[in-house]
Image: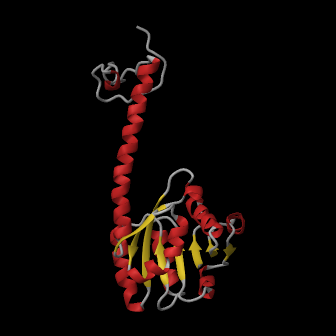
């Protein structure tokens, strides 16, 4: 497929690389002074400005991969003045799901379609793929299925509902994932302290040792400092 792509940062650039390797034709734009080098490194053609996306074959699709908030808002507003009826704007950033619903409502009178694939990436995602939770109308999601299939590992993407659903599911996903990661980190820290026999630094406020060492202090945090002399 032919796809416009805004944002060649670490995640966006790797996604473009995976798409190009999958046989898709990518026209990219990035405001960075190093945009030409970034595009070349990732195998994409470079648009001099957002207006360059008007040259894409209709119905056009442009993937926005920039920081959530004002950068995403400004980019989408600019694209609405360039794209036309039936074109699709894809927000792959970390937007709040309520913003997706608002944008879909605002763009509907102009007959734009929207898609909100929320990518979950781990180390090696450029090689192994990005799990995608996609929200949006059925027609653009089906039309863009080859893009999602290329980005994801086998069975790695799902259409989870209407506009906003993708980022909502990703929000729940992140809450669960980050809690698990914190739990793992604390568990490994405890095992490390136990295996090395080290102790924790005294609390400056109470003078006691940290609760992590079962010494009764609830305010200190685990450390890897040397044992405290008796």
> Where residue 50 sits in the image (x, y, percent)?
59, 80
Q: Is residue 62 left or right of residue 97?
A: right
Q: Can residue 74 be seen at all in this image of the molecule?
A: no
> Where residue 72 sits in the image (x, y, percent)?
47, 71
Quadrant of res 172:
bottom left
Quadrant of res 22:
bottom right
> Where residue 132 sits in the image (x, y, percent)?
45, 64
Tell me the residue at 54%/50% (across/down): 123
Quadrant location, the C terminus: top left
Q: Is residue 203 left or right of residue 28?
A: left
Q: Nearer the viewer, residue 225 or 140?
A: 140
Tell me the residue at 38%/20% (across/down): 202
Tell me the residue at 28%/28% (across/down): 218
Quadrant location, the N terminus: bottom right
Say if 42 sits above or below 203 in the image. below
Residue located farthest toward the top when viewing the structure as drawn: 230
């Amino acid at each position: 497929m032919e796809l416009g792509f805004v944002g060649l940062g670490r995640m966006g650039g790797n996604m473009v690389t995976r798409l190009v390797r999958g046989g898709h034709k990518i026209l990219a734009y990035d405001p960075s002074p190093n945009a030409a080098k970034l595009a070349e490194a990732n195998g994409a053609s470079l648009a001099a400005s957002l207006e360059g996306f008007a040259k894409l074959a209709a119905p056009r699709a442009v993937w926005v991969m920039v920081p959530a908030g004002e950068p995403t808002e400004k980019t989408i507003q600019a694209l609405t003045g360039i794209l036309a009826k039936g074109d699709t704007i894809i927000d792959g950033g970390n937007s709040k799901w309520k913003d997706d619903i608002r944008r879909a409502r605002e763009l509907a009178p102009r007959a734009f379609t929207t898609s909100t694939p929320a990518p979950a990436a781990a180390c090696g995602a450029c090689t192994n793929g990005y799990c995608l939770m996609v929200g949006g109308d059925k027609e653009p999601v089906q039309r863009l299925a080859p893009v999602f299939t290329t980005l994801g590992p086998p069975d790695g993407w799902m259409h989870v509902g209407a506009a906003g659903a993708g980022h909502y599911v990703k929000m729940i996903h992140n809450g669960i994932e980050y809690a698990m990661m914190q739990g793992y980190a604390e568990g490994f820290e405890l095992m490390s302290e136990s295996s090395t026999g080290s102790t924790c630094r005294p609390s400056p406020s109470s003078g006691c040792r940290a609760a992590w060492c079962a010494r009764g202090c609830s305010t200190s945090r685990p450390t890897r400092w040397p044992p405290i002399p008796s």
